[in-house]
Image (cartoon, rainbow, N blue to C red):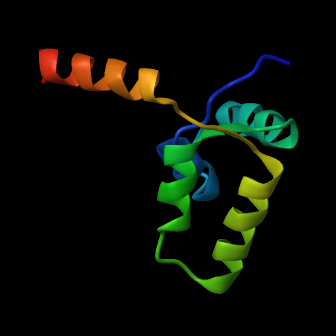
Amino acid sequence: MEQYLIDTNVVSDYLSASFSASGMALMDDVINAVPNISIITQIELLCWDTDDHTAQYIAEFIDDSMVININLEVIASCVKLRKGKK
């Protein structure tokens, strides 16, 4: 299966079942493999104000995920791109 970097909005849409049936099936496959998220997505997910059941699910999702850290070079590139375009 292909690897995907899952964004916070995708996790939110998946949890709320906002995708079409084929989209949910794809996300089921992605989630059942080893999901890839960034450290920023991890932080955003952990900041959600949610019920205990959902918070537990999110914690388990993060534990099962490959969390990709960012280094100073990536940060510098992002800053350069963001300053160059709105």
| The residue positioned farthest toward the front in the image shown | 72
Q: Please tell me whether residue 9 is drawn above or below residue 15 in the rendered image.
A: above
Pick the residue in front: 60 or 32. Answer: 60
Q: Please tell me whether residue 84 is drawn above or below residue 62 in the rendered image.
A: above
Quarter holding residue 75: top left
In screen coordinates, is 21 left or right of 60? left
State whether residue 85 appears in this view.
Answer: no
Q: In the rendering, at what x and y percent does residue 34 appear?
A: 83, 37
Pick the residue in front: 19 or 56. Answer: 56
Q: In the rendering, at what x and y percent does residue 10 appear?
A: 54, 42
Pick the residue in front: 22 or 4. Answer: 4
Quarter holding residue 55: bottom right
Q: Please tell me whether residue 9 is drawn above or below residue 53 in the rendered image.
A: above
**Residue at 49% over, 46% down:** 40
**Residue at 58% over, 41% down:** 19
Q: In the rendering, at what x and y percent does residue 57 appear?
A: 73, 68
Pick the residue in front: 30 or 21. Answer: 30
In screen coordinates, is 69 left or right of 2? left
